[in-house]
Image (cartoon, rainbow, N blue to C red):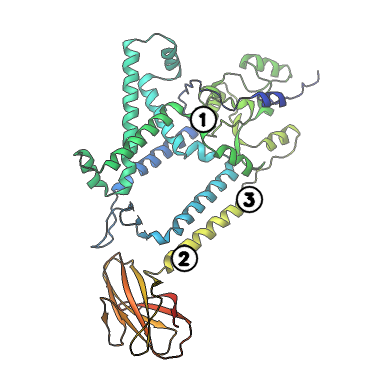
Amino acid sequence: MADAPLVRPLANTTPASIEDAPLYVSRKPIYPQAVKGRFRTIKWVLLAHTLGIYYFLPFIRWDRGPNALDQAILVDLANGRFYFFFIEIWPQEVYYLTGLLVLASLALFLMNAVAGRIWCGYLCPQTVWTDLFYAVERLIEGDRRQRMKNASGKLTFDVVARKLLKHSVWLLIAWWTGGAWVLYFADAPTLVMELATLQAPAIAYIWIAILTFTTYTLAGFMREQVCTYMCPWPRIQAALTDEYALNVTYRYDRGEPRGSAKKNNALKAKGLPAGDCIDCAQCVAVCPTGVDIRKGLQLDCVLCGLCIDACDTVMTKIGRPTGLIAYDTEMNVQARIEGRPEVRRIVRPRTLLYAVLIVLVSAIMLTALALRQRIDLSVMHDRNPIFVRLSDGSIRNAFTIRVANKRLEERRYALSVEGLAQVSLDAVGGTIDQQGRPVLAVRPDQTLEARILVTAQGNRLPSTTELRFTLTDLASGETAHANDHFKAP
């Protein structure tokens, strides 16, 4: 008897079904079953680390000296500073944050090129908090069967009490999430005391309320709907991936045709086609988005790998090889069907390009950080009047300069100018050093504005002359420069 042709089980993907498919489907309750295995363990480890970092990082201290805040990571909106351990970012250095966003995007592209939506399955905040909420739900209400029984049965005192306890814990987690977020914008221990004594700014309570509501709603109720309909990444990553990217794949070349273990064993004994899939649907039962991976890769699948753990557990119990569901490619499935060798190319031009770009952007940012100046100078010419002729015939222009001291101690700076032969410089409120240069004192981590008067001698001055202002740190010799123009009749 000839072998029956192997047909891949697909979801409804005919042109007619695609045209008739709704853009949005109302959420149906999903009751994921608890599962054990290596991917579930990886998810627990990542969940513990990511939540631990998020909740406790604001309390880590970093000594920056006597005149600086000691919170390791702080977004100081009041003073326009961003602190990250030993790094301090000023508002005019926002390009560093742009660089971080570029790095994050490239890292996301690299993960997608290696294993599709692996970010979604393991590290996305929506996945992490939803996973935590599911864990609380199972702990309080029981596993899949018990929760389904409670949902379809009558409301008893025990069921109501457990639901109230579950939602209370959810709200506590959501509140802690919102509270941890605001701690990144103020000194954490101080703000905690202010929140506890109801003395914190109103904006802190408002943001805690907003984030409590969003976390409770998104992780507690919307769950997989966020990944399917609200998040744009599933649609974007589909355009960025290729045939070599690993995805959670049902190996239908080995699994089909499906049947019970006893029936398929009997078929195999007779030399008839029989697959390893026993149609137990455990892969569907553990899926947090309710996907049947045997229908092929779908938009709802976040590639968390829990179906792999469930299937491997079943295969082990019935004495069959694991890996019926695994991180694989459609190309390899077809290769096995056709008797060709499998191809696994993690290192390929696409992944190399992303890796090189990540290294390049990181090197540029580190170099810029290492070489960046600790002083900043900007100059603005007075508009009215543009120039003034003095009684002795000289011409005077007025400028406003802004000096930023990015060090944590007070510094004294000398100002000089180049571009005109006979010129004098005066600073309103400043002092003069032995070389006749105005000297300005700027407090630690502060910005100073000063009015500068530039006076030029001579009757035949050009109407416009370019000036180069130089600011010199009297302690370190570090300089900063800025250009403007001297105006004359």
Judged from the image, the secondary structure of the residue bearing numbered disc 3 is helix
| Distance (Cα) linking label 2 and label 1 | 42 Å
What amino acid type should be assigned to the residue bearing mark 3?
Arg
- Work out whether 347 lies above or below 341: below
Residue displayed at 41% across by 37% down: 47
Depth check: 9 or 401 in front? 401
- Residue 408 is situated, as x and y percent measured from the top left of the image, at 28, 65
| Distance (Cα) linking label 1 and label 3 | 28 Å
Residue displayed at 26% across by 70% down: 410
Packing grade of label 2 (10 A; few <14, some 14-19, many >=20) is few
As drawn, the label of residue 34 is none
Location of mark 2 (residue)? 367
Note whether residue 214 is visible: yes
Depth check: 238 or 23 in front? 23
Which residue is farthest right?
1
Depth check: 480 or 177 in front? 480
Location of mark 3 (residue)? 350
Q: Is residue 270 left or right of residue 304?
A: right
| The N terminus lies in quadrant | top right
| Mark closer to the chain start, 1 or 3 | 1
As drawn, the label of residue 306 is 1
What amino acid type should be assigned to the residue bearing mark 2?
Thr
Q: Quadrant of residue 428?
A: bottom left
- Work out whether 354 lies above or below 199: below
Packing grade of label 3 (10 A; few <14, some 14-19, many >=20) is some
| The C terminus lies in quadrant | bottom left
Q: Is residue 23 left or right of residue 218?
A: right
Which residue is farthest left?
197
Contact between labelled residues 1 and 2, with CB atoms less than 8 Å apart: no
What amino acid type should be assigned to the residue bearing mark 1?
Leu
Packing grade of label 1 (10 A; few <14, some 14-19, many >=20) is many
